[in-house]
Image (tube, rainbow, N blue to C red):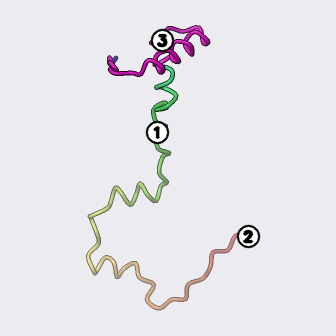
Amino acid sequence: MTELIINNLDDTVTKRLRARAADHGRSVEEEARAILHDAVGPTLPPAPPSGLGTRITKRFHGIGLSEQEAAAFELHGEEIKPAEFD
């Protein structure tokens, strides 16, 4: 755990912090910890997993195809038809 020291707090801030801690039944330190936690928030949730296409792209990025290999995947003038879902 990290220790935090805050210097030069106004007396009014200190009084309000004590009053707020008393209202919540906590020590001043616990109240300050709760305020900081609420202000900064919990840690960020993990990023959602990427889709299959994104993972494939990342894995093979930079490998590339030779011109001959890329030509093997071309349609060579064939008509593009939409997929049928029957």
Q: Nearer the viewer, mark 2 or mark 1?
A: 1
Mark with earlier residue (2, 1): 1
Q: Are marks 3 and 2 in contact (CB under 8 Å)?
A: no
Q: Helix, strand or loop at disc 2?
A: loop
- Residue visible at 39% across and 21% down? 9
Q: In whole angstroms, how far apart are the C-alphas of marks 2 and 1?
A: 39 Å
Name the residue tied to disc 3.
Answer: 28
- Residue visible at 50% across and 8% down? 27
| Image position of 10 with respect to 19: above or below | below
- Residue type (three-letter) at the residue carrying disc 1: Pro
Q: In whole angstroms, how far apart are the C-alphas of marks 3 and 2?
A: 68 Å
Please identify the dominant SS of the magenta region: helix
Pinpoint residue 11: horizontal percent, then vertical percent: 44, 17
- Residue type (three-letter) at the residue carrying disc 2: Asp
- Residue visible at 48% across and 11% down? 28
Mark with earlier residue (3, 2): 3
- Residue visible at 36% across and 57% down? 58
Q: Helix, strand or loop at disc 1?
A: loop
Part of the protein shown in magenta: 3-32
Name the residue tied to disc 1.
Answer: 46
Label 2: how many Cα within 10 Å (few below 14, some 14–19, many 20+): few
Q: Nearer the viewer, residue 81 or 18?
A: 18
Q: Nearer the viewer, mark 3 or mark 1?
A: 3
- Residue type (three-letter) at the residue carrying disc 3: Val
User: In the displayed image of the protein, which residue is found farthest to the bottom?
Assistant: 77
Q: Nearer the viewer, residue 37 or 55?
A: 37
Is 36 left or right of 64, judged from the image as shown? right
Q: Nearer the viewer, residue 86 or 7?
A: 7
Name the residue tied to disc 2.
Answer: 86
Q: In whole angstroms, how far apart are the C-alphas of marks 3 and 1?
A: 32 Å
